[in-house]
Amino acid sequence: MSVQEETFLTPVVPLDFTYNYYIGQYLTRYFKGFKEKKILGSRCPGCSKVAVPPRKYCGVCNKVMEEMVELPQEGTLENFTVGHVTMEKGGRLSPAEKPYVLGLIKLDDKASLLLHKVEGVDPSQVKAGMKVKAVWKDQVEGDYWDLDHFEPA
């Protein structure tokens, strides 16, 4: 058989594995705040910037940020994107049931931007600069999904 006559088989192998990731003391405190429906950030002692979600080192001046502060439940949508696909288990992309909005939300003048879903408004009507507020699940458990989404304030 010559090279031109060879055929190839291309199997699709879905990815399916679990990875346990240690989130550390800062994100642990962040999610504990979720149990009380609070959004926490870490404040830098040098430049006063607030990282949300909290982290140990300031991205501006590299100082250790030990102070946790509660951020407002309302903020400003600084930027956004409209999604049309979702990632399924195993990493496959599929069309979304309907377009959805992911927004970068500024909760405080000194805070970094928080990435989260924005609902309650048609994606064609979303505008940078609109005021949004946090919407929590009724029963919170202290994990990422407790803060369900943001909606127009």
Image (cartoon, rainbow, N blue to C red):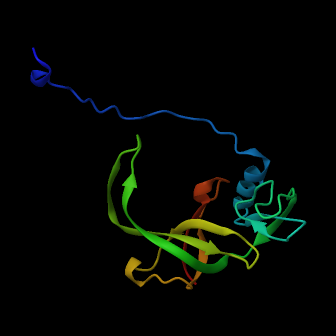
Locate residue 147 relative to residue 95 in the image: left or right.
Answer: right
Q: Which residue is drawn at 69% across and 40% down?
A: 22
In the rendered image, the quadrant that contains the C terminus is: bottom right
> x%, y% of residue 5?
9, 22
Q: Nearer the viewer, residue 31 or 87?
A: 87
Above-or-below relation of 59 to 123:
above
Residue 31, quarter of picture? bottom right
> x%, y% of residue 56?
80, 53
In the rendered image, the quadrant that contains the N terminus is: top left
Residue 63, quarter of picture? bottom right
Locate residue 153 relative to residue 99 in the image: left or right.
Answer: right
Above-or-below relation of 66 to 13:
below
Q: Which of 72 and 45 is in front in this view?
A: 45
Above-or-below relation of 39 to 6:
below
Locate residue 36 relative to residue 120 in the image: left or right.
Answer: right
Q: Residue at x 76, y 75 (%)?
A: 110
